[in-house]
Image: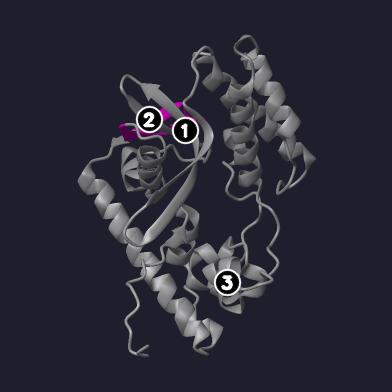
Amino acid sequence: MSAQMEMPDMPRRLFPATPSKLATFSDCPRRYRFAYVDRPSPPKGPPWAHNSVGSAVHAALRSWWDLPVERRTTGAARQLLYAGWSQNGFRDAEQAERWRARAAGWLTDYVAALDPTHEPVGNERTVGATTERLALSGRIDRIDQRGDELVIVDYKTGRVPSTDDEARGSPALAVYVLGVRRTLRRPCSRVELHHLPSGTVAAFEHTERSLANHVRRAEDIATDITAATETLAAGAEPDVAFPAVPGRQCGWCDFRPSCPTGQAATPARETWSFLAEDDEI
């Protein structure tokens, strides 16, 4: 048998990607290396108070929808928040207590406006989709049925209200739309950001063009990640293959303790610094 016999074409291996994975590399290749390449991964810095707030609110809403309809009350939502509350990242117990009360207020107001008999199509549902180069996946806070279409709902708890431009430009929301279409095989175009602190909703209706633009940008980032990974495998210095991008974001990077470049770029932020000012409470 000839050694020159041709092998059949092999399918291209898809790059497995989540929105956070792509965003990490786009923000700073070195942070991507610390999170996804180096093993063991370098130790992270301390937890952040705003993440504790967001995690508690998201967990409470997820569990609230899992309750029987007759138990979906505002009181139940508050109890779920209290049960899942963490003091991690706060300045002290007094600050954590005030923020627990504040978050409970947001949650009560939000749940009071919901129809408890409504059953979401998805509640923290993982979906996936493939493109020519990517195997995308992501976890959606909530999927609603609105008429004949499905709608993506993403909860937000940051101090700044969400905007329609933010909904339009979010790579994660675009991935969710693609994932719902592929996984659930239902029409889906609308994405919504529900900002609990302000009680506002920002929205965008995706088109085939807007989704294609997001896919193109995601594939470009994946191409850059692959090139950096291959450069590292070929023997390049890790900091050359995955360079740091220093800036203000270094003040709150989880891997700041392992990055001299980031430490020199800007002072460290306090772990409660992304909460609203105390005098606004």
Q: Tell me, yes or no, if residue 246 can be seen here.
A: no
- How far across and how far down the image is residue 171, in percent? 38, 50
State how far apart marks 1 and 3 are (Cα): 34 Å
Q: Residue tagged by mark 2?
A: 151
Residue 41 versus residue 130 in the image, above or below? below
Furthest residue toward left: 209
Sooner in the amino-acid sequence: mark 1 or mark 3: 3
Compared across the picture, whether 126 is left or right of 51 comes to left
Q: Residue at x 61, y 45 (%)?
A: 50
Compared across the picture, whether 180 is left or right of 101 comes to left
State how far apart marks 2 and 1 are (Cα): 16 Å
Residue 198 falls within the magenta-colored stretch: yes
Sooner in the amino-acid sequence: mark 2 or mark 1: 2
- How far across and how far down the image is residue 201, in percent? 39, 29
Q: Residue tagged by mark 3?
A: 37
The answer to which quarter of the image holds residue 93 is top right
Specify the quadrant that holds the C terminus: top right
Sooner in the amino-acid sequence: mark 3 or mark 2: 3
Provide the major secondary structure of the magenta segment. strand
Closest to the observer: 60 or 121?
A: 121
Numbered marks: total: 3
State how far apart marks 3 and 2 are (Cα): 35 Å
- How far across and how far down the image is residue 256, in percent? 62, 68
Q: Residue tagged by mark 1?
A: 195
Residue 6 falls within the magenta-colored stretch: no
User: From which residue to which does the magenta span run?
Assistant: 187-202
What amino acid does circle 1 point to?
A: His
What amino acid does circle 2 point to?
A: Val
What amino acid does circle 3 point to?
A: Val
